[in-house]
Image: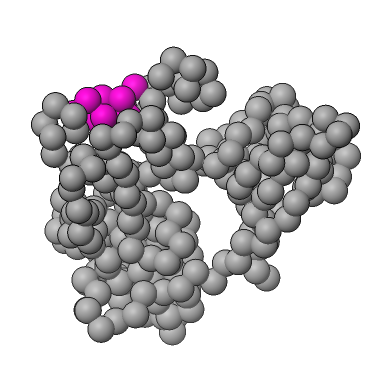
Amino acid sequence: MEHLIQHFRKDEQPFIEQVVSWQHEVEDRYAPKLTDFLDPRQRFIVASIIGQYDTLKTASAGLFDDAERERMLIYPTYYEPVEEDFQLTVFTIQYPVKFVQLRHPDVLGAVLSLGLNRGKFGDIRVNEHLVQFVVANEVAEYVRLHLTGIGKVKVHVESIKETEPLLQNEEEWLEESHTVSSMRLDVIISTILKTSRQKAQALITGKKVRVNWTERDTVAFELQEGDILSVRGSGRIKIMMTEGRTKKDKIRLQIGRLTQKS
């Protein structure tokens, strides 16, 4: 376990301790444990830690196809997870689409202003006529009753009917391969965005870069598999895989790139 923890970042330590306590809980109670919604990096950490144990497995679900945020189930190998185990509710928001267009940040802001933790909400999908979002069952009724306005817009939240299709992800991740001299944040940004190291460093120190939804302003910050970075104005980048080194000791990198649709 110790050698595994060295691979993670110092500021991920509290989350790792949380995962270890979940693991003990499942072993002691011999019953599954359901987490809140986790981002891809957190799920990578859970899978890495739980993957060390032959007696435990993990599964995850977020209802939408390609959901970014999902709840995870940590369970003993004898157990067969079913969809109900993940305790998920999908809501749709009715609002006067003729007069206003709700955007993702509007919806997220309104949901968080209800005083609930981000871990209780999954993905939010938005198109011209419709908003759908996933919440944990334990807060669903609270959200349905209290989410009555977004900005100045009056809204009505209701559960999705069985027959209603879920919104597909309009975004597309394009896979790219790169070779980089190191996994430093400035090196990766300058390589992928085809810009100078100075420009990449200016973006980072100018607080325009987030890694896993957290602002990072250290140019030498080390990236790892499973990280998602967003650079303001340049969409998002997912570190999918590091594939060993070239003869010149460079790292082969597989990334996914999400370019913002105009």
**Vertical arrangement, residue 67 with respect to residue 225, above or below:** below
Q: Is 84 colored magenta in this rendering?
A: no
Q: Would you place residue 118 above or below residue 220 in this image?
A: below
Relative to 45, 258 lies left or right: right
- Residue at position x 38%, y 30% in the image: 52
Which is more toward the observer, 62 or 7? 7
Q: Nearer the viewer, residue 214 or 8?
A: 8
Q: In which quarter of the image is residue 249?
A: top right
Query: Residue at left 85%, top 48%?
Result: 194
Magenta span: predominant SS is helix
Q: Position of residue 172 (x, y in %)?
A: 60, 66
**How many numbered marks, from 0 up?**
0
Q: In this view, does 1 lie to the left or right of 86?
A: right
Residue 125 in sight in this render:
yes
Task: Measuring from the top left, give residue 152's x and y in whole percent.
Answer: 37, 64
* Position of 93 relative to 256 (above/below): below
**Res. 106 visible in picture:** no
Q: In which quarter of the image is the N terminus?
A: top left
- Front-most of 239 and 29? 29
Front residue of 153/53: it is: 53
Q: In which quarter of the image is the C terminus?
A: bottom right
User: Compared with residue 112, is residue 165 higher up or lower down, i.e. above or below?
Assistant: below
- Colour setting: one colour
In the image, farthest residue toward the top: 2
At 23% from the left edge and 43% from the top edge, which residue is drawn?
77
Image position, residue 51 (x, y; %): 38, 35
Question: Left or right: 35 with respect to 85?
Answer: right
Residue stretch in magenta: 17-25
Judged from this view, the residue extending furthest toward the left is 29
